[in-house]
Image (cartoon, coloured by chain):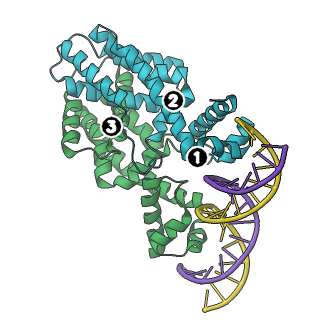
Chain colours: A green, B cyan, C yellow, D purple
Amino acid sequence: MTEKQELILETALKLFAENGFDTTPTSLIAREAGVSEGLIFRHFTNKEGLMDAILALSEERMGQKVQAIVTLTEPLAKIYAVIELPVKLFSEEREFWKLQFSLKWQKKYKGQSYRPSGHYLELVSVITDAFRQLGYAEPEKEVMLLILLLDGLSNQLMQQPSDEFIQSTLSFIKSKYFNA
Amino acid sequence: MTEKQELILETALKLFAENGFDTTPTSLIAREAGVSEGLIFRHFTNKEGLMDAILALSEERMGQKVQAIVTLTEPLAKIYAVIELPVKLFSEEREFWKLQFSLKWQKKYKGQSYRPSGHYLELVSVITDAFRQLGYAEPEKEVMLLILLLDGLSNQLMQQPSDEFIQSTLSFIKSKYFNA
DNA sequence: GTCTATAAAATGATAGAC
DNA sequence: GTCTATCATTTTATAGAC
């Protein structure tokens, strides 16, 4: 991966996150990255190829995050880590994750609608077990509820809420979970 | 509002909801509605005007829904009604509400980002009171949490989940709320 | 109110030189 | 690997006839 290739990827990521995939012209990406428009197509074939490359990075980074949670031993620690995940993702690489979440709502990518990644499914399974270990009566439903909650939280994080709001939300959510 | 005007609006709504605002050409709207493309611009000035007209309808319909909840007397009934709101909205007018929710993620409309409507703020205030009446210690935070939950639920509703999933989710959420 | 025809600009993509 | 120049299409929008 050459320097310009990375530059294109980084710029495209930023612009896609800010303005959406289909409202960001390749001409703008080229201008912002300071490269010729032709170069984008030489390296990534077409606009979709550019998105593919970004998504490949995404899978990799998400895998690392999930791994870090899965390796925790205490069930409650796992649950708290999942609760903190969206905030962590957004604070570390805001544009990157904004793009991820917004994809769900944009035009079907390559004809398929949004599909949860393998990492996501692994996480669900691990958290279900955690709830079970804590003695919750309906672990599957608890996970489902928690997902709804974190989905909504990710949603809110797009609006750049204050740090105070974020912290207060996190601790309030955590306060709802304990050994059953 | 003439017959063709309504037809254009209805068709645009459907297509915007399916494919997004900026990925739906006016030519397609015209073809699907069986009218000339020029007529769209004659009536709605430009593509944005078309969206404005749709959004005006939205405000009106949302107002009706909120009014129905506000007039309930029992605090728990209000909370349950809010919990049921997303499902009700999607089952009654799926495309319409899908468009609403997806707008949050699309390109900033007219340069402003998404802003909650007056109806929304009214609803928040009423539900906060309901929690207070039920004796909850931190009603504001409870509302915030509930909003996250319903935001996430709306998100999931986009994926056309099974009716069984929906019902089970609703009753599980409700089971978390009672007189404190 | 509605349609046909057309303009004007933007956009994705390719070819060929360096 | 990279750039310049250019093409083909699509898309928003307007003008004028009926």
Residue position marked by numbered label 3 in the rendering: A153
Chain for numbered disc 3: A
**Residue B122 percent location from the top left of the image:** 31, 25
**Residue A147 percent location from the top left of the image:** 37, 32
The answer to whether residue A71 is seen in the rendering is no
Q: Tell whether A44 sits left or right of A141.
A: right
Using the image as rendered, state which of residue B29 and residue A167 is in the foreground: B29
Residue position marked by numbered label 1 in the rendering: B47
Name which residue type carries label 2: Leu
Residue at horizontal 54%, vertical 20%? Answer: B92
Element at label 2: helix
Q: Which mark is residue B57?
A: 2
Q: Nearer the viewer, mark 2 or mark 3?
A: 2
Quadrant of the drawing holding the N terminus of chain B: top right
Q: CA distance from mark 3 to mark 1?
A: 32 Å
**Residue B87 percent location from the top left of the image:** 47, 21
Placement of A174 over or under B89, stated as above or below? below
Determine crowd level at label 1: few under 14, some 14-19, many 20+ residues with C-alpha closer than 10 A: some
Placement of A129 over or under B43, stated as above or below? above
Chain for numbered disc 1: B
Using the image as rendered, state which of residue B146 and residue B115 is in the foreground: B115
Placement of B69 over or under A168, stated as above or below? above
Q: CA distance from mark 2 to mark 1?
A: 16 Å
Q: Tell whether B138 sits left or right of A94.
A: left
Using the image as rendered, state which of residue B25 and residue A59 is in the foreground: B25
